[in-house]
């Protein structure tokens, strides 16, 4: 997983039916995380813009969030409220 | 998922039989997205060149688009018609 | 998927038994594709050196090419014979 | 898998229910490893901060650690206590 | 798959039980391969340090090497003994 900040959201009226009802948030991974840019993630925990969240990638996002048959490859699965060493070098 | 722009298409007459009937679009992810170049994605929503789309990657593309047995690792699963913070820093 | 050029091949006499009979081609993705170097892909369509091909990555390569139990993470699944916008900026 | 050092941890009170009870460690992959930044991994072996660990990524993390239905894409699966050539060029 | 050179090995006494009995080799992908650093791969073919090997990544490593329930995301699946164009530009 990676930790990032919710920086926006995306709306797609015309979409795959497995995505109907999902909220798509734009997450900016923290700069020291294993990612090379922003991720569009389905919100599984009610995250808002500005929050620091935990994002699961790949099949974990679908299967772990009861969307096994949806075309989802990233999901916000936690809201970070405490950490040790998150931004230290 | 990543958001990108449809910039072209690819035709392959000789191909795996699981791909027959699929349209292959070339998607250029937005520059701030987690991707390091263009992706060839099967079109699942009727996207056209120039449209801004949502692309699912990995097993999500096959399984979420009713192509579970096809060699597909990327699919256009939505057409973006509204967003907050998509291109902001 | 990514589009690339077949630039060579690899032979491994000692290998996992699920790979016996497979041809391993070296594919150089086009420079604007989402890849950061060459991929060794099983040939599923009879591609030759110098051809421009479509490569599927990840579980799609195994499952989509009737090699579900083989240790294969990349497969050539089409030969590109036409395209729009493939190399444009 | 990649080898890295445990450099911190993350707490998320509000999270996907499949993650309840898991410990989330921040792992900094060694600089020569195939990774481009820190990974948040579920701890499967009782690793502490400062330890050098083996991290499995992708579906292997869920399925190999008896968390097949949890949104987990990285797990610490071993503590490295000996190596040959780990940091050599 | 990627081609690389076996440059070392890792020992983890404390580890996930699905990994007991596996040998963990450090593979340095060839510089023109699609990888951004060294990979720790389970040895499926009896590879030794210095050998040039074929490495399968992701679910292919587990499923293709009869370790479907182990937290393994990379495996050495062949020893390269011949090639065309492997290191050419």
Image (spheres, coloured by chain):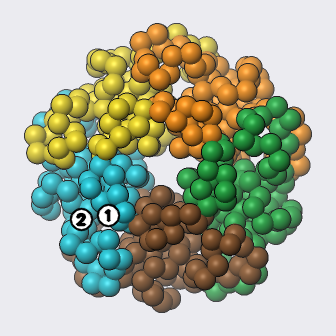
Chain colours: A cyan, B brown, C green, D yellow, E orange
At x 47%, y 58%, the residue is B59
- Percent position (x, y) of residue D31? 49, 31
Q: Is residue B74 visible?
A: no
Picture residue at 71% right of the left edge, 62% below the top: C76
Instruction: Locate the C terminus of chain A by quadrant.
Output: top left
Q: Secondary structure at mark 2?
A: strand
Label of residue A40 in the image? 1
Q: Vertically, is B79 above or below C6?
A: below
Mark 2 crowdedness (10 Å alpha carbons): few <14, some 14-19, many ≥20? many
**Viewed as shown, does residue E56 lie left or right of B88?**
right
- Chain under numbered label 2: A
Quarter of the view holding residue A37: bottom left
Secondary structure found at label 1: strand
Chain of the residue under label 1: A
Mark 1 vs mark 2: tell me if same chain.
yes
Query: Where residue A32 sits: x, y (%)?
Result: 34, 42
Using the numbered discs, state the Cα–Cα distance from disc 1 to disc 2 in whole angstroms: 6 Å
**Would you place residue E18 above or below residue A20 in this image?**
above
Residue under the point 82% across and 58% down: C7
Give residue B21's quadrant in the image: bottom right
- State if disc 2 and disc 1 touch (CB < 8 Å): yes
Query: What mark, if any, has residue D89 been given in the picture?
Result: none
Q: Where, by quadrant of the figure, is residue D7 drawn?
A: top left
Measured from the top left, where is residue E67 in percent x and y?
A: 55, 31
From the viewer's perspective, is B16 left or right of B71?
right
Say which residue appears at 62% left-offset and 34% top-offset: E65
Numbered disc total: 2
Q: Is residue E21 left or right of residue B1?
A: right
Q: Which residue is mark 2?
A: A25
- First reached walking from the N terminus: tag 1 or tag 2: 2
Q: Callout 1 environment at 10 Å: few (<14), some (14 to 19), or many (20+)?
A: many
């Amino acid at each position: 997983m990676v930790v990032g900040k919710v920086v926006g959201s995306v709306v797609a009226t015309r979409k795959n039916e497995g995505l109907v009802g999902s909220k798509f948030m734009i997450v900016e991974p923290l700069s020291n995380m294993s990612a090379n840019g922003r991720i569009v993630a389905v919100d599984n925990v009610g995250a808002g813009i500005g929050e620091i969240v935990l994002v699961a990638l790949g099949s974990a996002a679908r299967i772990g969030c009861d969307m096994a048959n949806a075309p989802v490859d990233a999901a916000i699965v936690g809201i970070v409220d405490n950490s040790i060493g998150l931004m230290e070098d």
